[in-house]
Amino acid sequence: METKIIKIDKKQINKSMIQEAGDILKRGGLVAFPTETVYGLGADALSEEAAAKIYAAKGRPSDNPLIVHITNMGDLEKVAEKIPAEAVKVAGKYWPGPLTMIFHKKDIVPYGTTGGLDTVAVRMPSHEIAREVIDAGGGFIAAPSANTSGRPSPTTAQHVKEDMDGRIEMIVDGGPVEIGVESTILDMTVTPPMILRPGAVTEEMLTELIGAVAVDHTLITADSTEAPKAPGMKYRHYAPNAELVIIEGPASKVTEEINRLARARQKEGYKVGIIGTEETVSGYTSGDVKSIGTREDESTIAGRLYAVLREFDDDGVNYIYSESFATGGIGSAIMNRLLKAAGHHVINIQ
Ligand code: TXA
Ligand code: MG
């Protein structure tokens, strides 16, 4: 299949191009499009056959459920049941935006979309192009991140092309995304509501709005022996080809240790990548050193994380050594993804 790539300007959305994307979705085809978090791989969420195509294109395990994307509150009631008052409050503040909520599903949502579960994940994105594509495609669009299963999520249309060229009908190129890590997932079927995946809508923000919020504690701890509650979080994805190791401890010692590890691997003939920050990159003496952003503004780190992992794949490095990041705010999302990419391999040098 030939994948058509169309460029759409967020500030001047070309309606006939959107229509073309919508028609493909309505016919049960696959269209990748930008959202504010990462690029999504869209299909009609209410069609079992369309959802099945997503699993095939991504090589995704079929027990890993998809998120249903909508554009208005009226549509939430069509797919979800027993919507608690707290969810309406959270939606009022953070929808549209980088937040997904889990509810009991209505019959209209096929099990092929929910991975066999009786619950459904729903998100209302804020990205203008995403919203137009969803509406043009019928209003209920299942969209996982548009990477092949196991690779870092795509934050540019080029990343999508790398993974999906020839496997899907269309890629809508709306430029790089804003946030760079996937939406926060909040399970509203339990009391108190539980964060299953950290994202840009943080635990602090949710607690301030609705009080107690639980956090799936398997998410940012170093040992991952217990299975996370969101099926997708159990897979080692977001992963680069190289072996990634996180080094944790006081800043100056971390740099020293990474330099030591890098030199040792280089002596063995391996190619080494290093993930540093604006504040630290000048301290690294060898290897393929990349700044992932500045510690002064952690959203810059979230924005570059997946792109950096993909760049190291392109560079063909064998080992990546990364600094560790603070876990408050968006930091939890960064560390959660980094730990997963590292298969929870952390060296602590307190
Ligand atoms: O930001 C995002 O959420 C992006 C953009 C494209 O919207 N989408 C995304 O989808 O990250 P995906 O499929 O890559 O991740 C969805 C996660 C998986 O970990 C999945 O297991 C979990 O959501 N999930 C979906 N439905 C669920 C359910 N009913 N119960 C528990 N976890 C669920
Ligand atoms: Mg994903």
Image (cartoon, rainbow, N blue to C red):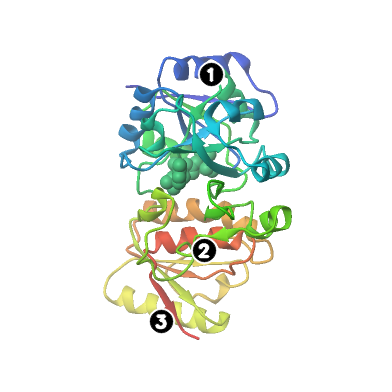
223 or 344, which is in the foreground?
Answer: 223
39 or 109, which is in the foreground?
Answer: 109
Mark 3 crowdedness (10 Å alpha carbons): few <14, some 14-19, many ≥20: some
Answer with left or right where residue 89 lies relative to residue 308: right
Q: Mark 1 or mark 2, which has the lower sequence index? A: 1
Check residue 307 in the rendering and tell me which mark sits there, or answer none: none
Kindly report the distance in space between the C-alpha atoms of the residues bearing marks 1 and 2. 36 Å
Kindly indicate the quadrant of the structure image that contains residue 116. Answer: top left
Which residue position holds label 1? Answer: 138
Mark 1 crowdedness (10 Å alpha carbons): few <14, some 14-19, many ≥20: some
> Label 2's element?
helix
Q: Tell me where residue 91 appears, x and y as whole percent.
A: 67, 40
Check residue 260 in the rendering and tell me which mark sits there, or answer none: 3
Q: Is residue 38 visible?
A: no
Question: Can you tell me whether the CB of the residue at mark 1 lies under 8 Å from the nearest atom of ligand 1?
Answer: no
Q: Amino acid at mark 1?
A: Gly
Q: Is residue 320 visible?
A: yes
Q: Which of labels 2 and 3 is toward the front?
A: 2
8 or 193, which is in the foreground?
Answer: 193
73 or 104, which is in the foreground?
Answer: 104
Q: Tell me where residue 287 appears, x and y as whole percent.
A: 42, 69
Q: Amino acid at mark 3?
A: Arg
* C-beta proximity under 8 Å, tags 2 and 3: no
Kindly report the distance in space between the C-alpha atoms of the residues bearing marks 1 and 3. 55 Å
Q: Tell me where residue 303 appears, x and y as whole percent.
A: 58, 52
Which residue position holds label 2? Answer: 335
